[in-house]
Amino acid sequence: MSGGALALALGAAFLHAGWNVLLAGSRDTAAATAGVLVYGVGLLAVPALLTGGVSSEAIPFIAASAALELVYFVLLARAYAGGELSVIYPIARGSAPVVVLVFGAIALNEDVSAGAAVGVLAIATGVLLVGLVDLRTRAGTQIDSPLRDVWFGLAIGAVIASYTLVDSEAVEHADPIAYLALVIAPCALVYPFVAKTRPDLGVRSALTAAATFGAFLMVLAAFRLAPAAPVAAVRESSVVIATLLAAAVLHEAVSARRIAGALCVVAGVAAIAYS
């Protein structure tokens, strides 16, 4: 893996973790999410027009992915409204490749390698470490359980896996940037009505949108310089980055066990990526 590809993948990881921290720290996560989608359409419009290349065969994929992305952003905004990023983010990012792997094994009869199996076990261990970290008592009083955040993380991970499967087929019929723009546009229109909110078009939302779609473009650029597996593995270092940022920026109580869980998730994703 070249130095340029490594820098791009790490940059994408920092941006992805960063925009999630910005969103989670918003006063109104629903309004901020609506604003991110509106800004996203604006940011992607010109690159989409310049790249073009969307065939009619991509339309069903665009519709399916737009519906899934809408669910993703609804769940994400609700999860971060009162939830802990250091629980939600690692579980969501870690469970998604497991769902994809299981779907491929069951529905497509794909073989599961030993490395992938080890990766699944590592992610499962990480999820347990992250999700069960606060299931204990202090001075005889039970600390709030993160089970709500665990369920949100698993639900978001399932949606990520679903649109990943759709998008992996769609890119054969459309330029990735133009495709993403067409997926995000209907989300930006529908989301405010679903979430019953008005878009927050402040500076914070603009920065979040820039980081969101900048991370996507950096991953695409990294894929041009290196194979997908190592890029994907490095990109998932965002799990650890987000956990550390949650402690530093959001002042979440991130323990050593939760950090260990995030590291297990990263190791598991890397094992699946390389298998």
Image: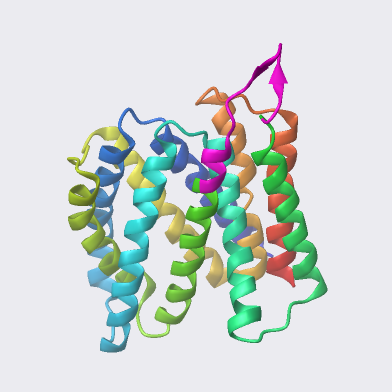
Query: Which of these two is toward me, 236 or 220?
Result: 236
Is 102 left or right of 224, judged from the image as shown?
Answer: right
Q: Residue furthest top?
A: 139
Q: In this picture, is 18 found above or below 212? A: above
Q: Residue furthest front?
A: 140
- Residue 146 rendering spot, x and y as whole percentages: 58, 35
- Residue 123 rendering spot, x and y as whole percentages: 71, 54
- Residue 71 rendering spot, x and y as whole percentages: 35, 57
Q: Quadrant of residue 255?
A: top right
Q: In this picture, is 228 found above or below 197? A: below
- Residue 38 rendering spot, x and y as whole percentages: 22, 50
The residue lying at 72 percent from left, 62 percent from top is 120
**Labels in figure, total:** 0
Is 186 left or right of 26, judged from the image as shown?
Answer: left
Res. 7 visible in picture: no
The residue lying at 27 percent from left, 81 percent from top is 59
Question: Magenta residues?
Answer: 135-151
Is 236 left or right of 119, judged from the image as shown?
Answer: left
Query: Which of these two is toward me, 267 or 230?
Result: 267
Q: In this picture, is 175 found above or below 173? A: above
The residue lying at 42 percent from left, 35 percent from top is 24
Q: Quadrant of residue 118?
A: bottom right
Quadrant where the C terminus is found in the figure: bottom right
144 magenta-colored:
yes
Quadrant where the N terminus is found in the figure: bottom right
The residue lying at 33 percent from left, 73 percent from top is 64
111 magenta-colored:
no
